Image (cartoon, grey):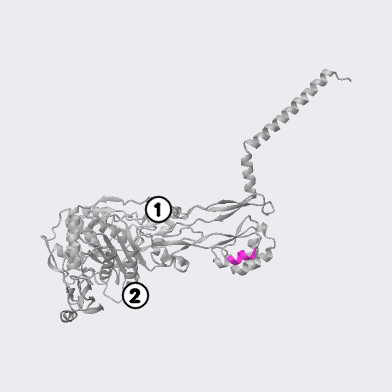
Amino acid sequence: MRVSNVTVRKRLATVLFFGFLIFLIIDIRLGYVQFFIGNKLTALAEDSWSRNIPFEPERGEILDRNGIALATNQSAPSVLVVPRQIEDPADAAEKLAAILNMSEEDAYKHVTKKANIERINPEGRKISHEKAKEIRALGLKGVYIAEDSIRHYPFGSYLSHVLGFAGIDNQGLTGLELTYDEKLKGEKGSVKFYASAKGQRIPDIADEYTPPEDGLNLKLTIDTRVQTIIERNLDIAEATYNPDGVIAIAMNPNNGEILAMASRPDFDPANFRNVSPDVYNRNLPVWSTYEPGSTFKIITLAAALEEGKVDLTEDEFNDPGFVKVANARLKCWKRGGHGHQTFLEVVQNSCNPGFVELGERLGKEKLFKYIKDFGFGQKTGIDLQGEGKGILFNIERVGPVEQATTAFGQGVSVTPIQQVAAVAAAVNGGTLYTPYIAKEWIDPITGEVVSKTTPEAKRNVISEETSKQIRHALESVVALGTGRGAFVEGYRVGGKTGTAQKAQGGRYLENNHIVSFIGFAPADDPEIVVYLAVDNPKGTVQFGGVVAAPIVGSIMEDSLQALGVEKRKDQIEKKTTWSDPKLITVPDVTGLSKSELQQQLIDLKLEITGEGDIVIDQAPNPGEKIEQGTTLRILLGDKKGD
């Protein structure tokens, strides 16, 4: 059958139309791929070809307030392999195993593993530079050395519980390392290279380097001068008393900055795996809770003064050695009691019955209101892990006996940091601050301060006038009362002793106490508060005034000198006993001749240096009080001023 020309033309037009339509669709599709999703597809392709060798960032350093490094980084390379690039797996495994001290079998598993990039872990992680150099010298294809770092604590166990430590991946695990891990760790970088499906490098595509972003440096409120003094005194306390533990905190009472914090037992953060978790997981100054004993009496005193319930010099109290409350007989620490005394002497003598009387004058509602206002029964908010809250009586269950024992620090449970914050408020004019330890965040490249912590005043607890009376009363405790062991010649120190019997299984232990002392100085304008507690000291009378007070006195003297606080002569004269060393006032011997020296200084040893016949300088300075028999250092010259 013959087809007409018209039909042929129609069919050709139809074919051409559909051909054009198909071509248009293909063209549009190609244009879409080329111009709209080309970059995406290219990126996906590159991702399938790419291999990343990671570069770890430098973890931010931790510094003290003066810029001294407490936690830094040391370079520690790591070994990576790209299994598909390994030409002879058995040979590579043998050579790597010999250098990395691992079995050939384990090394072979790594170099033949079906993975784009394989870490040799743990033997190839954080290796020495010597081993890294040996591996590079092998020239093995597919074996790479990646830059890495390991955390370094240059002072060992120094400040260990506060700093904490970081793991093998430089992740914070405890202490400040954990609390501020996000800011310290930084962002990873990498070197990206391109490989074929067989894992071989594609030579015409350049490697891409993304630099790591280092973590921020953290500057602390810690002052290493004070921290070193406290660490030294804790070591001495351990050696002297073999205690179950020791705790110390130093704080600036005017803003909440922690100047030092330490405890025993401690540990080396670089070797934390060799220490029981019970040691490194418990930062005792913020974690431990126990009965405070007589240091808690400061709170009862503050409440009574603020409420106008006592006049320290006018009101009097008779202590027969005990007080009866309900069906209980509560004893004073001194057998037979202190007899007739003013309430200032009640404070100086740490007289339990006298503080029971103050608690009764306040009533349980007022007493417990002030206890809570001073921060007990709640976390202080310090920026450290694992803070405890302590335990207070439920006020609805507080009877006369519970009220009485609480007034002198028994039957309640507190943390050391709570006591430091509370006493700081009692002596700084009445303001309760949140303690803190992270002071500033610093850019490691520019050195600029990125952010800083501002002191947080929670509330005013007492008035300045009440605080002034407390300071005077506690200064008299150190000069005239149970805290004389903390007396420092030339510095006005105030404070309070504490002796608390430890409880276990609902019963008090025999001859097992936590003895403590909390002190501050200068007493008229405090710059530092120091708390020290010794858990079950051996071979001594377990009293805070005997054990803890002298240690705090030593810490105070050295710390005040380190902080540049000048000595003064306006302190309360210390009440001496037969056991106290005899003190003499240093005379002014400048201008005297050698012969005159020998005639006048019969109570002092002389250490003479210099040439000449006239004294041109001396140490200690004139007017200072020192123990009889102390060495006086003399510098001689030809005339005054030489």
7 relative to 352, above or below: above
Answer left or right for 184 relative to 226.
right
What is the quadrant of residue 102 in the picture? Answer: bottom right
Quadrant into which the C terminus falls = bottom left
Residue 525 among magenta residues: no
Identified by mark 2, the residue type is Ala
What is the quadrant of residue 239 in the picture? Answer: bottom left
Element under disc 2: helix
Viewer-closest of 457 and 378? 457
Element under disc 1: strand
Quadrant into which the N terminus falls = top right
Q: Is residue 353 visible?
A: no
* Segment tinted magenta in the rendering: 133-139
Q: Nearer the viewer, mark 2 or mark 1?
A: 1
Mark sitting on residue 3: none
Q: CA distance from mark 2 to mark 1?
A: 38 Å
Where's residue 310, x and y in %? 14, 57
Residue 135 among magenta residues: yes
What is the quadrant of residue 298 in the picture? Answer: bottom left
40 relative to 609, above or below: above
Where's residue 100, x and y in %? 59, 67
Answer left or right for 52 relative to 309.
right
Instruction: Name the magenta segment's main secondary structure.
Output: helix
Q: Residue at x 17, y 73 (%)?
A: 588
> How would you rate the neighbour count of disc 1 (Cα within 10 Å): few for under 14, some for 14-19, many for 20 or more?
many
Write down the residue under mark 2: 239
Identified by mark 1, the residue type is Trp
Where's residue 28, x and y in %? 67, 32
Write down the residue under mark 1: 441
